[in-house]
Image (cartoon, rainbow, N blue to C red):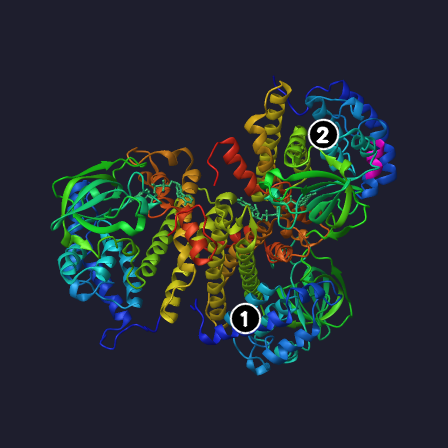
Amino acid sequence: MTVTIDADLGAPARELRAYLDSIVPGYRERWGRDSSFEATLAWQKLLAAGGWAAPSWPEWAGGRALGVLDRVACDAELARVDAPMMAGVLGLQNVGPALIMFGTDEQKASLPRILTGEEIWCQGFSEPGAGSDLAALSTRAVAEGDDFVVNGQKVWTSQGMQGTHMMLLVRTDPEAPKHKGISVLTVRLDSPGVERRPLRQLTGESEFAEVFFTDVRVPKTALLGPVNEGWRVTMATLGYERTGIINLASALQRDVESLVTGLTVEDPLLRDELTRRWMDARLTGLLGARALAALGEGGKPGAAQSVIKAVWSRTTAELGETLMAVAGEQALLAENPAAMRFLRSRASTIAAGTTEVMKNLLAEQVLGLPKS
Amino acid sequence: MTLTFTDEQEELRASVRRFLADKSPSEAVRRWMESEEGHDPAVWRQMAEQLGLQGLALPEEYGGAGYGPVELGIVLEEMGRALLPAPFLSSVALAGQALAVSGDDAAKQRWLPGIVDGTRTAALAVSEEGSSWTLEGVRTTATPKGEGWALEGTKTFVIDGGSADLLLVVARTDEGPALFAVEGADGVSRSPLTALDPTRRLAHVTLEAAPAVRVGPAGDQAGYLRDVLDLAIVALAAEQVGAAQACLDLSVEYAKIRVQFGRPIGSFQAIKHKCADMLLEVESAKSAVYNAASVAAERIAGAGEELPIAAALAGAYCSTTAVHAAKETVQIHGGIGYTWEHDAHLYLKRAKSSELLFGAPAAHRARLATLVGI
Amino acid sequence: MTGSLTATPADVETDEEFRARLRAFLTDHHPGKRPRDVVEGRAWHKAWLARLFDAGFAGPSFPREYGGMDLPFTRQVIYQEEYNRARVPGPQGTGLGIAAPTLVKYGTEEQKQQFLRPMIRGDKVWAQGYSEPEAGSDLPSLRTTARREGDSYVVDGQKVWNTHADYADILFTLVRTGTPESRQKGITYLLIDAHAPGVTVRPLRDITGGTHFSEIFFDAVRVPVANRIGEENEGWPLVRTSLGHERAAGAMNQAALYRRVVTELTALAKERGLTADPLVRDRLADFEVRVRIMRYTGMRVIADIVSRGEPGPASSTSRLFITTFEQDLHEFAVDMLGADGLLLRDDPRSVQRGRWVGGFLSTRASTIGAGTAEIQRNTIAEQVLGLPRDPAMPPR
Ligand SMILES: Cc1cc2nc3c(=O)[nH]c(=O)nc-3n(C[C@H](O)[C@H](O)[C@H](O)COP(=O)(O)OP(=O)(O)OC[C@H]3O[C@@H](n4cnc5c(N)ncnc54)[C@H](O)[C@@H]3O)c2cc1C
Ligand SMILES: Cc1cc2nc3c(=O)[nH]c(=O)nc-3n(C[C@H](O)[C@H](O)[C@H](O)COP(=O)(O)OP(=O)(O)OC[C@H]3O[C@@H](n4cnc5c(N)ncnc54)[C@H](O)[C@@H]3O)c2cc1C
């Protein structure tokens, strides 16, 4: 079986296309290219209204239970109209699936609100002392009556300022080996004792935050999954959205292809560089397509899938530089899109697992090399 | 050729480093980069009064100390290391040196003393839209008018062009490109640019029948101007090397103390090898820039025919080194490296901007290829 | 470089007079082209080294009493410049660069008298026997044993990848005299007669098709205790001995050599009409940049030694710089030449007798032999930058 990114549209993608045709003009008229939180929230509400905010979720949760292939075809439709991000993307892609898999009925009640953006979830994983070594986290949750009392600090929390809720990783058993004493709590960020401070990124934007917890009382009913099994819960949810990385790959390919064809570059050295980026992006897309084909046949995506993040990161980072070189002196200006893109691209090899750590994992888990 | 430093030169380096650590630590850099002026005028004055840095490499007849590009390079290296926001590169290294080597006594007499004592600043305006740091790209014209000249055209990415008291402008005449001095606001409109590098001010300058005085040797100035541009490239390269060294130092220091997985990240080979490679590049870049500064000194003394080669070489290698070092510094610092509050991004922006200011590395290599007969 | 800090007052000759005298000798006595036959070539090489020695122009960094020239550092630099310029062959075998300094520093008077002069004159060829099949980067794990029996050691074991061992007379080796677990604390530095009974040298073909290195088997080889350098079990610290800063002087050779190579590659590119291609120009210019930097770094290190007695950190990275450079250069040359560039030396249509593809293959060893690039980076990171050691590594 061969699958390409632009495979024949299935019924769901056709339906989405029709829906998009009906909403995009009005949205653009109101919001244009605005990428503010309000704009992305408005967009999410529109999609949610048509039942398109999280089509891969099960139907009972407000999704359409789409399979991998349909899901990717739908994402291609969104890309076709250059759809903006949705405001509550972390809730839709990461937290929602965790609630679906491990949530109590009470917790699952959040799902419809995640779809509409009423609840904006963020992920409180990293701490000042626990980044790559996430399992070293030290934010403590101590059981006290019907509550957990939480103390500690999270950092670099994307959407930490806009978030209403957080999927919070805490240490519940300090005596146990480090992976075995972690639990997941679902926390309202308006709880007393939660303090947030915006963190400015190197781009100048404040897209992440540090979040402090001082004697924050969280009801025990907020425990997601079994106590002290937070590591397993986290890993399982990371695996849920296997199409996420494939979409990333195909998005990069589309992005670069449209970028490159939109540029007129005469300098042979720059043309050569751009062509390389184009090829890298195409190869990244093909890796995604291969992984997708395997998934579509019900198989395991294998090594092709495992290398995508590292390849994507590298290509994204190099692309940032190439575009800056193409912009030339214009990139001396802060508002130059290529300069901005270059700066943002520096996060691609850090966020969601640094390239160095990713490569360690590839070496150990895919190639079977001994642990250092 | 001097590739190593005398005790006196090392002492100069140490005292500049002390001064900058004291007067221009990171907090101060951040405060001033957000300010209107872009730099601390008090520090600028102290630099002139206490250390005489503005005049260090400018001729003694005009109040300077009469040293040359080698000493200037030392100072710039330290300034690059500290990311000092100040019109030093523009006023001293670019405009000051341009005047110093102009052979034009009247011009020197008129403007150098102010530059030397720091009471006035000057900027060198070369680039135009799409022209890069070349004479060939200059379209601004100069036509004789009365006693002087009138300039017509638009300059951009002029370093400190918004605040400089004196603009030295490269413009075309019937006899080829030449340098002109423009003072005052008559016919000149300047607009600040929002630069990617917040520690360096850039401006756009429009000249409409702006009155100007011709500066520099009589007759054909192509050779003179070529030297002026090359001296600028060498000066910038020295700054880049200082910034790259600072990045390496920051990275090594952090890699020693940041613990993940129960050990300092510097004990992981991925990090170790990055640092070793950075050292290799920083040391090589130093070789390139010390050579270039030394050739520049010879050039000022009337020899140094290799200046264009040495400058192109330093421009190409030091740019790449600084950018690479800054990128690795962000990476080695992980999430912290991506924040505004850490200095890594200031180095990244400085390095990336410097790479584009006086011609990208590929442009330097293309020029070098021609110069060495490839 | 002027001003000779290290020159002795007894020196009546100026640096420039010395340079002129050496240059004249090298020009007047140039041995011409190396015979193509391997055996004849070696004899020709030996004859040249002897002539050099007899004229008093061998062993620039070694003491006079053992046949060297004992030149001050600045003169060593001049020597290397001239030697390189003359394009005459250097020493045979690997002893002069590696073993001789150890011998000078740690050998007994008898040993120095016995071994140094014939090595410097080239009468005896020395080869290095350190690496073993199970001990490469981790040399302290070596297993070749030497058992003491009266006035001899009895050596058993195997060495491998030993350059020039196939025609060597003396093997300078590291052997285990301590317990198997003793690592660097149980290693002894031993000189072994390559022609002694029980020594078998088997040439190994390398990636280029040539036989530049060998494997060596020791089967109950008796070695006089008098051939031990330093004390028993104390050979390890002797391994990295160098005399003054002769290596820094030698580094200029590489720079001079590659200066020539880059010029030749550029000429070749022009001859084939390739320099009109901006991509080719860009790469050639990059090599031009790097080869010049190689020279400036060499000079900087030398200048630092002369003015403050110590080379700076640049000396620690120069080997890594050069090895990466030579690999990149040859790989680019092959790419630039296209399919023609792939023809090997014996093909009549090969480009310049296959030198570029040959270089592409042989420079693969640049980042392996004498300490791999990975190990070098570790060493730079730990010893120059002070980064912490990998806790999983055995203690040094
Ligand atoms: C834009 C952005 C958004 C983010 N969003 C979130 C979020 O929403 N929620 C959240 O919880 N976190 C978030 N993070 C944090 C991110 O997950 C961490 O930055 C990342 O995991 C790295 O951790 P660290 O920053 O502590 O770096 P460290 O782990 O300290 O790493 C520092 C350096 O050491 C290297 N290193 C570490 N361990 C090893 C090893 N074993 N071998 C080799 N090298 C190693 C790393 O590769 C890196 O170069 C975000 C980060 C960024 C940049
Ligand atoms: C052309 C040539 C000539 C030679 N001549 C001689 C000679 O005359 N005499 C002699 O005794 N030997 C000689 N050698 C051998 C040479 O010294 C060894 O090959 C070298 O020390 C590497 O050892 P190894 O081959 O066993 O590789 P290994 O040590 O097995 O290394 C294999 C790979 O693992 C990597 N590695 C090993 N340890 C580490 C670490 N701690 N961290 C990261 N990476 C690591 C290496 O970098 C390498 O990439 C020669 C080799 C060559 C190629």
* B198 horizontally vs C175: left or right: right
At label 1, which amino acid type do we have?
Leu
Q: Which residue is mark 1?
A: B72
At label 2, which amino acid type do we have?
Phe
The quarter of the rendering in which ligand 2 is drawn is: top left
Mark 2 chain: A
Q: CA distance from mark 1 to mark 2?
A: 65 Å
Label 1, secondary structure: give it. Answer: helix
- Residue A89: x and y, percent? 75, 36
Quadrant of the drawing holding the N terminus of chain C: bottom left
- Residue C281, labelled with which disc? none
- Residue A102, labelled with which disc? 2
Principal SS element in the magenta part? Answer: helix
Look at 71% across and 32% down and name the residue there: A98
Whether ligand 1 has any atom under 8 Å from the Cβ at mark 1 is answered as no
* C33 horizontally vs C268: left or right: left
Check residue A43 for magenta coloring: yes
Q: Magenta span covers which residues?
A: A41-47
